[in-house]
Image (cartoon, rainbow, N blue to C red):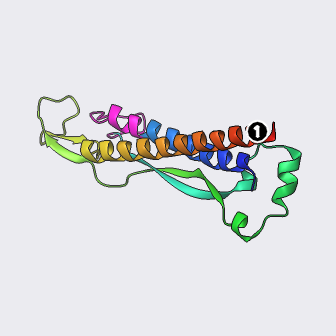
Amino acid sequence: MDLFQSMQISASGLAAQRIRMNVIASNLANINTTKTPEGGPYRRKDVYFRPIEVNELGGGSDVARARISFKNELERELRGVEISRVVKDQKDPRLVYNPSHPDANDKGYVSMPNINMITEVVTMMNAQRSYEANVTAINATKAMINKSMAIGR
């Protein structure tokens, strides 16, 4: 495996976590949205990941792509990540008694999004730590490349 493949793997993690953060931001921004174009309250969204083979990540030189065809067993196990899907939570909305709200039903209850702020913040912290770990891996790989180039001088 060349060092650029490890950067591609980490970059796939960065991209996936960035999308995850966007979905979390959307959930938090819509925590009080009671009416959507589809009707009803906003539904929380969640991101699901799937592993992706290194050679599906794209990029790299022709030489690097040629090396992929000669991978050993360890290299066949290497995986990046991508978003497999973003799904809407199917839990029922929360009913909040607020008869003065314009979206209240005839009993005075408003259907609110099924979003728990604590869950979203914990998920956001997890995404942030995963993003930071991938940045650290990229920086370590860059340092190894720089050391390799210094040895070659």
Q: Nearer the viewer, residue 119 or 74?
A: 74
Q: Nearer the viewer, residue 65 or 44?
A: 65
Q: Is residue 95 left or right of residue 4?
A: left
> For the stretch drawn in magenta, what is the main secondary structure?
loop
Q: Is residue 60 left or right of residue 100?
A: right
Q: Nearer the viewer, residue 45 or 120?
A: 120
Q: Is residue 30 magenta?
A: yes
- Which quadrant is the C terminus positioned in? top right
Magenta span: 24-41
37 up-or-down from 121: above or below: above
From the top left corner, tell me how far across and down residue 149 is, in percent.
76, 38
**Would you say residue 19 is visible in this rendering?**
no
**Would you say residue 47 is visible in this rendering?**
yes
- Which quadrant is the N terminus positioned in? bottom right
- Quadrant in which residue 125 is drawn: top left
Q: Which residue is mark 1?
A: 149
Give me the residue at 64% from left, 58% from top.
79
What kind of residue is marked 1?
A: Met
